[in-house]
Image: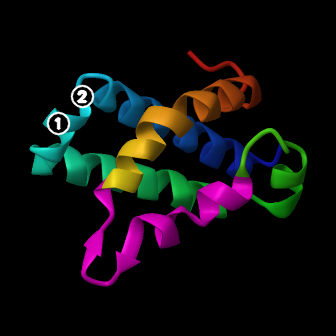
Amino acid sequence: MPKDDAVYFGHMLEMARKAYARASQLDKTQFDANEEAQLALAHLVQIIREAASRVSQPGQDAHPEVPWREITGMRNKIVHDYMGVDFDVVWQVVTEDLQPLISALERVVPNDT
């Protein structure tokens, strides 16, 4: 794996773990009432998207278990216009999509501790 790709895979895994850990401390009602949590989770999801977009095409091709198209299209899904973020989508991503992504990335990132 190219060195840069390894960095991006590691960063994706680290941010996904952070987002999943934060979300697991909340239920949907708490999330909806907590602007700080909303903004933090949206930011972490956007960082995951940005890191994924920087993985080389060969790196992406070597790991089809990672849903590249869904991840790199995430910004358009959660930022529904320039005025705001769809926090219902953010909640769905962090509660439904991150655990499978974390599992996939743990198989990719070498010597993860």
* The quadrant where residue 47 appears: bottom left
- The answer to whether one can see residue 89 in this image is yes
Q: Look at the numbered disc 1 and give the secondary structure of its residue.
A: helix
Tell me the residue at 43%/44% (across/down): 92
Residues under labels 1 and 2: Cα distance? 6 Å
Picture coordinates of residue 98, whole percent (x, y): 53, 35
Most extreme residue toward the bottom is 82
Q: Position of residue 94 (x, y in %)?
A: 43, 39
Looking at numbered disc 1 in the image, what kind of residue is underneath it? Thr
| In the foreground, 108 or 84 | 84
If the image is split into quadrants, where does the N terminus sit? Answer: top right
91 left or right of 36 in image? right
Dot 2 falls on a residue whose secondary structure is: loop
Q: Are marks 1 and 2 in contact (CB under 8 Å)?
A: yes
- From the image, tell me which residue sits under label 2: 27
> Which span of residues is magenta-colored?
68-87
Residue drawn 22% across the image and 54% down it: 39
Quarter of the figure with the C terminus: top right
**In the image, residue 74 lies in the stretch drawn in magenta:** yes
Q: Position of residue 61 (x, y in %)?
A: 89, 52
Label of residue 108 in the image: none
Return the residue at label 1.
Answer: 29
- Residue at 9% of width from left, 44% of height from top? 33
Residue 53's spot in the image, x, y percent? 64, 63
Residue 54 visible within the image: no
Q: Residue 104 falls in which quadrant of the image?
A: top right
Q: Is residue 105 magenta?
A: no
When the figure is inspected, residue 34 is found, relative to residue 95, above or below; the finding is below
Foreground pick, 76 / 72: 76
Task: Decide: is 25 above or below 55.
Answer: above
